[in-house]
Image (cartoon, rainbow, N blue to C red):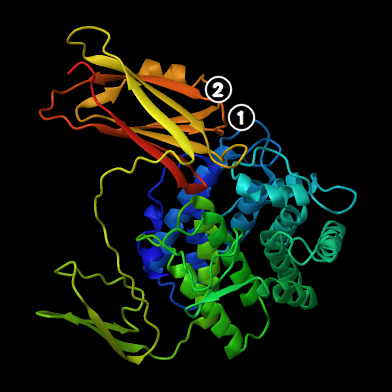
Amino acid sequence: MGTALQNIDSLLRMSSGCGEQNMVRFAPNVFITRYLAETGQLTPEIKQKAAGFLESGYQRQLRYKHTDGSYSAFGEGRGPGNTWLTALVLKTFSQARHFIHIDEQNIKDAARSLTLSQTPSGCFQSTGKLFNNALMGAVEEGLGLSAAVTTALISSGLPRSDPILQKALKCIKDLVSAAPDNSNLYNQALAANAFALAGDELMRKKIVSRLDQSAILADGQMYWTQRARPKEGSMYWDRAPSVDVELTSSILMAHLLKPNLSSSDIGRASQIVSWLTKQQNPYGGFASSQDTVVALEALALYAIKTYSKDGTDLRASIFSEGFSHEIQVDNTNRLLLQTIELPAIPSSYTVQAQGLGCLFLQTTLRYNIPLPRRDLTFALSVLTECLSLNATHFPVTIRSRYVGNRVSTNMVLIEVKMLSGYSPVTESLEELQKMPLVKKIEKEVDQVTLYLEELTRDSQDYTLVIQQDIQVQDLKPAIVKLYDYYMPEENAVSDYSDPCL
């Protein structure tokens, strides 16, 4: 948890301007604070800092609340509230009230809006726009959604004897019994977690046993994938899809929610954690907002279950030819993220550790490469036009469409970097806001970000006007990046220059 703890406000290097993305800043704070509290490491200083983050995230999330108590990515007036997001908010608010003041009315409102979506069968139906269509199977089938809502209602404190929960659990049990063994793994994982929280160990164990049959084992690690099973021995941790991180994290929680974990249970969980930590970015987060929230919740639960109050006294020596450095970890600094800069790359480095305790070591390599020209999933072109000789402003048109193997994308972001010394014309951004599929526009000092509901096979053009504020010598091109927010591995990159120069 050390990297995430030190970089809680920068877990993602992605835009974060909607209700779904705000949760990536709020929810991990709740999980980490809970971990520190349950392990007796929540000092007054850390508690004060965490409370500040939690309060800020809580107040920001209320901007996306609807009058009916639900929540959506862009708030009231942009369509109905979203069931999935409302369930996540309810669950997280319920956990956060142990550390900051959460108005109970907000919890009651969210719970009420979810219960209104319950059908006579006890299952729940989805409302609102789901921006991550990798989970569409869960919505269509009903099992995943009903399990997620049930988990949120249990977390909010709704009594297990409540008729709403009794009907919901019966719905989930019926769907699990009717589903084939090879049905949607993500749905099954959510169902296992719901039964674990409801105290039904028999159903949790039954589902986990079924899930374990689909596990992939390689190099002492364990994970699950919704893609075709890779070749034996292949580990693709440098490009694991976000949905696989989320899936594996959900199954890890299903394992850890077993009462009275044995050493073999911890060993199996450690194999899953070993795979998950290889997916982390240098800030402790993951590829997108959704998998970051789920993975950090699972890792925090693992940290709680494996924490030992026994004295820690570890020394790790890192050395190569002409270089050596020693890291000391004990009870006084076990929460401190220690970093060192390696003097030469490439080179061979050896790490030797001795002592008592658990040490996590991560290497981070940062480098610049020429922009890849990829049109595998998106067709992207950037067009500019010089309107007059020596003009100080010009239009930039971004033409894009989806060419991948799905019907349409999830939410898409287009990040338009500004040329050095240039800025966008405000009036052109106001016109852009009226364009089809545009949900929001963010303006920063050196970048404009467009939030699109989705992209399809149909080509879409978006034009903004750029103006020169300061003359800059030897001007370099500026980058335009387009990507699926929930599957950032699907992206396209292009650039543009001032056509009048």
Q: Nearer the viewer, residue 87 or 491?
A: 491
* Residue 286: percent from left, percent from top: 45, 58
**Residue 444 visible:** no
Work out whether 391 lies above or below 94.
Answer: above
* Residue type pointed to by label 1: Arg
Work out which residue is located at the far front of the displayed protein and give it. 231
Quadrant occupied by the N terminus: bottom left
Image disc number at residue 436: 2
* Residue 331: percent from left, percent from top: 35, 84
Q: Nearer the viewer, mark 1 or mark 2?
A: 2
Image disc number at residue 8: none
Work out whether 262 lies above or below 468.
Answer: below
Counting the numbered discs, the total is: 2
Q: Residues within 10 Å of mark 2 (few under 14, many from 20)?
A: few
Labels 1 & 2 near each other (Cβ < 8 A): no
In the image, what residue occupies the spot 36% across and 26% down? 382
In the image, what residue occupies the spot 62% across and 89% down? 262
Report which residue position mark 1 lands on.
78
* Residue 76: percent from left, percent from top: 62, 32
- 70 on left or right of 2: right
Q: Residues within 10 Å of mark 1 (few under 14, many from 20)?
A: few
* Residue type pointed to by label 2: Pro
In the image, what residue occupies the spot 44% across and 22% down? 462
Work out whether 451 lies above or below 134.
Answer: above
Is label 1 in a helix, a strand or a loop?
loop
- 200 on left or right of 455: right
* Residue 411: percent from left, percent from top: 54, 38
